[in-house]
Image (tube, rainbow, N blue to C red):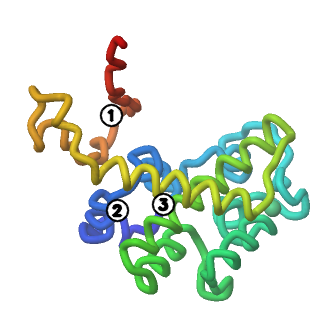
Amino acid sequence: MDANVSNNKSFWTRLWHLKILLKVKHFMWRVICDCLPIKDCLLSRRVEVDSKCPVCNLIDETSLHALVFCLVAALCWKLQGVRFDSAAINNTTDWVQEIYQHSGRSEVNKIFMIAWMIWNNRNDVEWKQKGRGYKDIVTSAIHILNNWEFAQDRSFDFFIGFISQTEGNMCWKQPQTGTIKINTDAALFKIKQAS
Ligand SMILES: [Zn+2]
């Protein structure tokens, strides 16, 4: 990771304060820290794997290739109307900075959601030999984001009277160096009333 970025508080603050699914925020943190289990990272740790990208099988896989410039990823960005200049982007930090510079908050949320879905698709191809089309990837990402935003806007305290508006509001924080942080997902469901 770029040392200038790792010490740039506003860069991280912007990520932590995005209104987006926690697992997507965590995913983007891993992208920026370059710690996704991408082929070039695994090889650098002496894990014996085929270096080729599992989606296009054309060139060696890096995070930047998998999420931005691989064939399916590039089609997703084109469909979303986003252009990334390969000559100006050398790593995932450059990529995120480019997104921050040229996109509003809502657009940043969509781009990170689509990136997360591109990563899921990459894993499905790698482990299940079953990928999705680029239109399906983008549509699914936007659909999940819209549903999540809708759920955030709803007031649930009409059926959970003992929970106030502010309780449960949490902001994900980067773990301290040398510590391991485990993130889990949880959901609340409306209790089905007996008929
Ligand atoms: Zn590829």
Q: Nearer the viewer, mark 3 or mark 2?
A: 2
Q: Which residue is mark 2?
A: 15
Q: Position of residue 51 (x, y in %)?
A: 82, 51
Q: Position of residue 58 (x, y in %)?
A: 90, 63
- Disc 3 marks a residue whose amino acid type is Ile
Question: Image point 27% across, 42% down: which residue?
Answer: 176
- Disc 1 marks a residue whose amino acid type is Thr
Q: Quadrant of residue 161?
A: top left
Q: Quadrant of residue 61?
A: bottom right
Q: Position of residue 21 (x, y in %)?
A: 41, 49
* Horizontal relation, residue 124 to residue 14: left or right: right
> Going by the picture, which residue comes out furthest to the right?
58
Q: Position of residue 46 (x, y in %)?
A: 72, 40
- Disc 2 marks a residue whose amino acid type is Leu
> Going by the picture, which residue comes out furthest to the front?
195
Of the numbered discs in the image, which one, if any, rests on residue 179? 1
Q: CA distance from mark 3 to mark 2?
A: 10 Å
> Could you say whether the residue bearing mark 1 is in a helix, strand or loop?
loop
Q: CA distance from mark 2 to mark 1?
A: 20 Å
- Of the numbered discs 3 and 2, the one sitting upstream in the chain is 2
Question: Image point 16% across, 36% down: which residue?
Answer: 157
Q: Residues within 10 Å of mark 3 (few under 14, many from 20)?
A: many
**Along the viewing direction, whichever of 100 and 48 lies nearer the viewer:** 100
Q: CA distance from mark 3 to mark 1?
A: 18 Å
The answer to whether the residue labelled 3 contacts the one labelled 2, judged by CB atoms less than 8 Å apart, is yes
Q: Residues within 10 Å of mark 1 (few under 14, many from 20)?
A: few
> Could you say whether the residue bearing mark 2 is in a helix, strand or loop?
helix
Q: Which residue is mark 3?
A: 32
The answer to whether the beta carbon of the residue marked 3 is less than 8 Å from any atom of ligand 1 is: no
